[in-house]
Amino acid sequence: MKWTAVVAALLVVVATVAADDAHKQQVVNRLLNRITSHIPSAYAELKNAAETYDPAHDDSHYTDGGEAARHLVQEINDHRVLEQHHWFSLFNTRQREEALMLVDVLLHAADFATFEHSAAYFREKMNEGEFVYALYVAVTHSPLTDHVVLPPLYEVTPHMFTNSEIINKAYTAKMTQTPGDFNMEFTGTSKNEEQRVAYFGEDIGMNSHHVHWHMDFPFWWNGEDIDRKGELFFWVHHQLTARFDAERLSNWLSPVDELHWDHPIKDGFAPHTSYKFGGEFPTRPDNKAFDDVDGVARIRDLLIIESRIRDAIAHGYIEKEDGTHVNIDNEHGIDIVGDVIESSMYSPNAAYYGALHNQAHRVLGAQADPHGKFNMSPGVMEHFETATRDPAFFRLHKYMDNIFKEHKDKLHPYTKEELQYANVQITEVDVGELSTYFEDFSFDLGNALDTTETVEDVKVTAHVSRLNHKPFTYKINLHANQAEKVTVRVFIAPKYDQNLSPLDINQARWYAIALDTFWVDVAAGDSVIERSGSDSNVAIPDRISFPTLIHDTDEAVAAGGQLSLSVGHNTRGCGHPQRLLLPKGTTNGMDFHFDVYISTGEDSVHDNVEDGNHGYCGMHGQKYPDKKPMGFPYDRHIPDRRLYDGLKNLHTQTVKIFHHEEH
Ligand SMILES: [Cu+2]
């Protein structure tokens, strides 16, 4: 399937339907509401479409002449598709194929009515998990749904984000018709030191960011080109790893160790989470030795794939399927190495270099039942929604991050000429108070429950503790020789390791967390740039809760008016939660480097870049806005810190992040 042509054809249509965003929002809300129950009769149009629409005979309403729709209808009629009320995993090849068949149908809808009717029809005939995935991906990528806000997945499929204990209480609440708000604890006990950082791995906002990132940049994507997709894969996971290590240091833990295929997996994990359909997520004990996983991979194959990738890095080229070479010893190499390691459809030779990341997720997820003896459902590692709960996720990503580092460290260190920017001298950076705290956050569990037209719904919510920080700003005082647009990059990095030994510049730069990148016009002479943490280009505000989204949309539709939702700069779910921008501090203050680096505005690809979430998530359908490698100027080895110390356009200082139990 090639969607380039489809998207072009649809651009014409978009202009004529853009006035009806509220209606579209309502349709998407209703398709996702009570996802494990049938469409209620109150949603008359959807119900009618589900019963009477015939996608196999509506050729003119699809840009592919109805081919994708006919194909999927045939599969359903042949009873080849996964039944409803069954778990779904994107890593299961056949299940993914089915979900993508629906993505194919929806992305070929020529108008929104066809999108809506097709979605309603297939919602009632396909597996719920496949449907939710396909709808999310289609809404993310279709120009027909440009302004639709996707509800937070933790309220659409709460089972994937909520402890079983809480889900059970929610069932009881409904059975007894008693509303409830239940306190959700993090998994495990204080006997497990990993539990100290469970608040990060189990943060529902961070999980939501992770799953959305993989929907924005699917490994299976073969539609129109996505700019620097492989590099983004490296960068977003590298930053997740750096963030996790900062949380560990703040909790007196050492940075996470990488996974070794030939060592036991040190930390086990008991997820305390259940599928809506498919029983409990499997548990893995401590020190489990890796087993081959039937039908997925043998451990020795993974070792061979690893060594082929590292050979390519050592050689400085990837060998394509036809035997020709692609040079990777340059700043674009990381993009190809990312495609190879994931691997995505962009990998130049998946037959040879395999799919290290995807297979590793599956192998780790299946360690509780590697030969299928116990008919266990897939493990948490086999879903982007749940993977970060397992400490093995970060071990796995540290392992891959180290392979990326091998490539980056091979590139020539930046020279003074590449780093300096003579126009600007940073004189001082005033950083306001940086402090973190935990707060309570509630989310809705309505979608976890079954619905019938005869039993009243009751309000059931869970509340959970989550990290937040006080709003902060910083002021950059600078002198510019001439007025010019400049690029500002802001990083923080832990200053000390777990033994309170200072991290050297090459350790610290790899632990650096990008707080922001932005473009601004500076005047000649002295000036001050004031910037708020909430403007960060890597973070997004809180998602609108599903009940609020439904309520506001229904109100707007009933009033025949426009829908305006407070979603900040963007409608996308990709982006680190704003409140997690700062790593957790300590009571006495944890020391961080706070670095501001200014370079020419010519680093920007676009004339104007609005604030938003482009740092980790790019700009939909456009080029990634920063010409420089992601992580610049800390992505490469630094042989001598005096080079960086001598830069007038780089300002570095130590700041403290405090943590307060009360705020
Ligand atoms: Cu990921």
Image (spheres, rainbow, N blue to C red):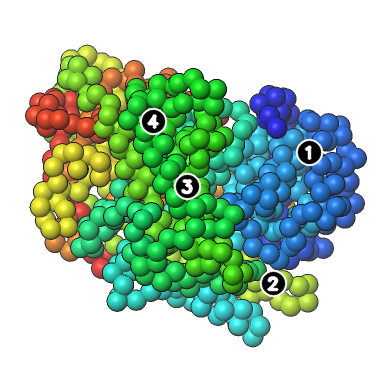
What residue appears at the point 66 percent right and 36 percent down from the top-left corner? 142
Query: On residue 312, which mark appears?
Result: 4
Number of the front mark, 1 or 3: 3
Q: Quadrant of the N terminus?
A: top right
What percent of the width, then of the height, locates residue 539?
A: 40, 45
What residue appears at the point 54 percent right and 27 percent down from the top-left corner? 321
What percent of the width, then of the height, locates residue 296?
A: 56, 53
Q: CA distance from mark 1 to mark 2?
A: 31 Å
What residue appears at the point 48 percent right and 63 percent down from the top-left corner? 367
> In terms of sequence position, does the residue under pointer 2 or pointer 3 come before the other?
3
Q: CA distance from mark 1 to mark 3?
A: 35 Å
Q: In this picture, is 527 found above or below 194?
A: above
Q: In this picture, is 480 found above or below 570?
A: above
Give the farthest residue toward the top.
482
Q: Label 1: how many residues lie within 10 Å, few (<14), some (14-19) or many (20+)?
A: many
Query: On residue 301, which mark appears?
Result: 3
What percent of the width, then of the height, locates residue 113?
A: 79, 41
Residue type (three-letter) at the residue carrying disc 3: Asp
Q: Kindly indicate the quadrant of the structure image that contains residue 38.
A: bottom right
Residue type (three-letter) at the residue carrying disc 2: Asp
Q: CA distance from mark 1 to mark 4?
A: 38 Å
Secondary element under disc 4, as helix, strand or loop, is helix
